[in-house]
Amino acid sequence: MFNISTVWNIENGKSVPEAMEEINSLGFDAVELSWMNEAVFEQVKKTKFKAGSVHSYLPEPMKLRADRWRNSVFNLTAIDEEERVTAVKWTKRTIATAAEIGATVVVVHLGNPEGMVNKSYPLKDLYSTGKMNTPEFVKLKDQILFERDEKKGKTFEQGLKSLDELNAYAKKTGIKIGLETRLHFEEHPNPVEFTHIFKEFNGGALFYWHDIGHAEIQERLGFVEPKGYFSLFSSRLAGLHIHDVKVMTDHQAPGLGTLDYRQFIKSFQDKNIVKVFELHSSNTKEQVINGRKMLEDLAKNA
């Protein structure tokens, strides 16, 4: 019923064969390959695994950037055309990788307005210390919304240009592109932009990838209504990233936070939807297995 991402253990000090053997021992149906440069990916290909999905970029560029999350090292919405073209190139390579190893979906980060990287972290800190809706919180949130609104137009247009190329390429391969709900509201796409994308590329290879924890954090911070993403785009759903949230700390094994999973039961039961546990390496093997069993029981007893 569930898959698991290699982010859980691919960099925990074990050799690649040991890490893949460990991840295969957990009892999940398949894996999502992520956080691998070409050298690691070549080693993984020599091991036994079943791929359900791939997280772009895979393989990832050898040289990452200190100011960018590794899965967003190149921005599909970049104003700089050279960077945007590079992002498209690496995403196409990821799509080809997915086709090569028998995965069905590539998870993609679209990008962010120029200069708006990790702007919500101070807001999350205020929430974590009980300062939700204080004047300081409201002022900072308004600043983020104002700056995003000022900058979104140019970068979103660049993103649409990138998606046009990727949609055409993915359609030829039969691979779905799952556009992921991002952790921070300032990133693309927000609900209005998702709506535009799915109207623009209706019938194409672009689908919705719902990150349960990311959406929950946006909801807790008041950027979107409860279930604001899932209720709008579940008809376009290709897959889920599953993890729990404790206050503002995400990527916890189910059961370690306070997230209510009952709203996702039908998606858990749907064999056409890819369902991936995306967990930090701090989660123990026992916590991972217990989380999977908890959601399996929830889905089976509904």
Image (tube, rainbow, N blue to C red):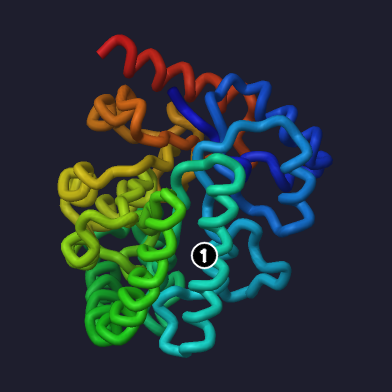
Which quadrant, please, contains the N terminus?
A: top left
- Of residue 136 and residue 263, the one placed in the foreground of this image is 263
- Tell me the SS state at disc 1: helix
Residue at which label 1 appears? 91
> Quadrant location of residue 297?
top left
Residue shown at the point (57%, 68%) measured from the top left = 90
Residue shown at the point (33%, 46%) measured from the top left = 210
Residue 280 seen by the camera: no
- Of residue 104 and residue 246, the one placed in the foreground of this image is 104
Q: Is residue 100 depicted above or below 72 in this figure?
A: above
Residue 108 percent coordinates (x, y)? 44, 59
User: Quick one: which residue is furthest to the right in this view?
Assistant: 15
- Of residue 111 and residue 93, the one placed in the foreground of this image is 93
Classed neighbour count for the residue bearing mark 1: other residues with Cα under 10 Å, few (<14), some (14–19), many (≥20)? many
Residue 3 percent coordinates (x, y)? 51, 31
Q: Is residue 237 depicted above or below 31 in this figure?
A: below
Residue shown at the point (35%, 81%) measured from the top left = 158
Q: Is residue 57 depicted above or below 14 in this figure?
A: below
Tell me the kind of residue under disc 1.
Thr
> Quadrant location of residue 187?
bottom left
User: Quick one: which residue is furthest to the top in this view?
Assistant: 301
Q: Determine whether, in the image, residue 97 is placed left or right of residue 17.
A: left
